[in-house]
């Protein structure tokens, strides 16, 4: 028997997603979603990422830290199947798995070095703020990108389902924040909410329930009305 | 600080590659290379992989068990750079990394259930026999397959460099093994050896050195002669 190993954290994700609810279900879906990986000591050294800047995309392996203590089951109900049908945990990308390790291909925008710190600036993330990173690997097109792969129950990207509309109040706040430098906040909200992040069982009942998601330092309050998402209010987190 | 976690083995790889030397450097390169993942208790249950049969490809996350105890360095010398230039360990797919976790996209041929055992039959592997598996995830084309990804120092698949020729003795043995049911052994040897699995520093010196690789129960002895690989002898392992 080979001894089992414990994991070393090599970095931490600083993400716009401060809570689990509302995070895109796969990377790349919300391309506006930016984040930084900060390498933690002793990995905060240029040497560790030398040559990585030549790659347009990287793999991030991380720990699903916010759900790891909730355990796992042999089957899960993926949102893509309406939350009704069960598939095996190894036939899913659910965070609730025997080894709670996540895998995301993300765009690498830049690597920056600031006062002994190393930051990898990435885009298209589906990763929670504060997530521990356990590995970074270059994305190798010739072995990682399989053009002809067919995808079982998740063959294509989720469709944009909802139009997103804003209350006058929300509109005003976003205009103000745009002046404060958050110039893509509105687009980001549209990207995220058009995917309908409600748990699958909400789609049929509790139709008028109010939800909120957290992005950056803001709380975005919304509900579904007549097949559109209405953003009712944007407040400070 | 989030506590670090230990890894649970969920399966073991039964592979034709019995030794590290000669294993393809990325998955998919040697498509003839077949293997089976056996799920180990308590994961040896149909439930865990229900729905996975609909996916043509899967991700296998595994432990680089045969090299994990050799430690790691902040930089490595990838074979693709001739073994001369150093890049950061996180800019490489080297097995010698802070968390010795490997990531391979492989073709899923079939899932079989035999007397309480569950086997995933896979192709295109670059994984050593006996490797512990820590996770299996479906390959999702829409987020995992990035058509436009550009690849730094490893933008394209390694070129086939060498013609592979066989001694009369090796030829005879392979003919015999073909009759024994090893009907693709010769093609497999050609696929693997044409990639020139020699360590990069051998390409320029020790040109006449003899090498051997292990495939299935065979030892394949070979050397490089005039820009061709000569298989001198095929013996029992």
Image: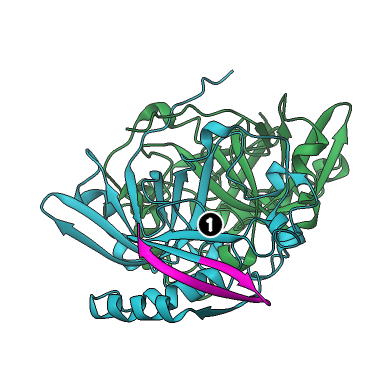
Chain colours: A cyan, B green
Q: Is residue A177 left or right of residue B38?
A: left
Instruction: Determine the secondary structure under disc 1.
Output: loop
Residue B128 image point, x, y percent: 59, 37
x 44%, y 27%: residue: A6
Q: Is residue B2 above or below residue A24?
A: above
Magenta residue check for A224: yes
Q: Position of residue A166 (x, y in %)?
A: 48, 79
Looking at the image, which is closer to me, B25 or A179? A179
Q: Residue A157 appears in which quarter of the rendering?
A: bottom right
Quarter of the image for residue B37 reads: top right
Q: Which residue is mark 1?
A: B195
Q: Which residues are magenta?
A: A222-237
Residue B99 visible to the viewer: yes
Decide: is B215 above or below B188. Answer: above
The relative height of residue B77 versus residue A142 in the rendered view (above or below) is above
Residue B65 belongs to the span the image colors magenta: no
Query: How many residues crowd around disc 1 within 10 Å: few (fewer than 14), some, or many (20 or more)?
Result: many
């Amino acid at each position: 028997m080979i001894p089992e190993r414990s994991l070393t954290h090599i970095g931490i994700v600083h993400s716009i997603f401060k809570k689990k609810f509302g995070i895109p279900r796969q990377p790349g879906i919300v391309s506006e979603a930016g984040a930084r990986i900060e390498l933690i000591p002793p990995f905060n050294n240029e040497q560790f990422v030398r040559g990585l800047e030549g790659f347009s995309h990287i793999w991030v392996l991380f720990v699903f830290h916010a759900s790891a203590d909730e355990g796992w089951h042999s089957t899960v109900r993926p949102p893509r199947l309406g939350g009704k049908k069960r598939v095996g945990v190894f036939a899913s990308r659910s965070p609730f798995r025997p080894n709670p390790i996540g895998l995301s291909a993300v765009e690498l925008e830049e690597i920056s070095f600031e006062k002994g710190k190393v930051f990898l600036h990435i885009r298209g993330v589906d990763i929670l703020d504060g997530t521990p990173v356990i590995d970074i690997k270059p994305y190798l097109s010739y072995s990682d990108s399989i053009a002809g792969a067919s995808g079982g129950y998740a063959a294509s990207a989720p469709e944009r389902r909802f139009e997103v509309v804003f209350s006058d109040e929300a509109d005003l706040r976003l205009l103000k924040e745009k002046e404060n430098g958050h110039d893509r906040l509105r687009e980001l909200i549209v990207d995220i909410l058009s995917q309908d992040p409600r748990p699958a069982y909400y789609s049929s009942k509790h139709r008028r329930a109010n939800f909120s998601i957290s992005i950056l330092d803001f709380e975005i309050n919304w509900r579904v009305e007549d097949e559109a998402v209405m953003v009712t209010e944007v407040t400070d987190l």
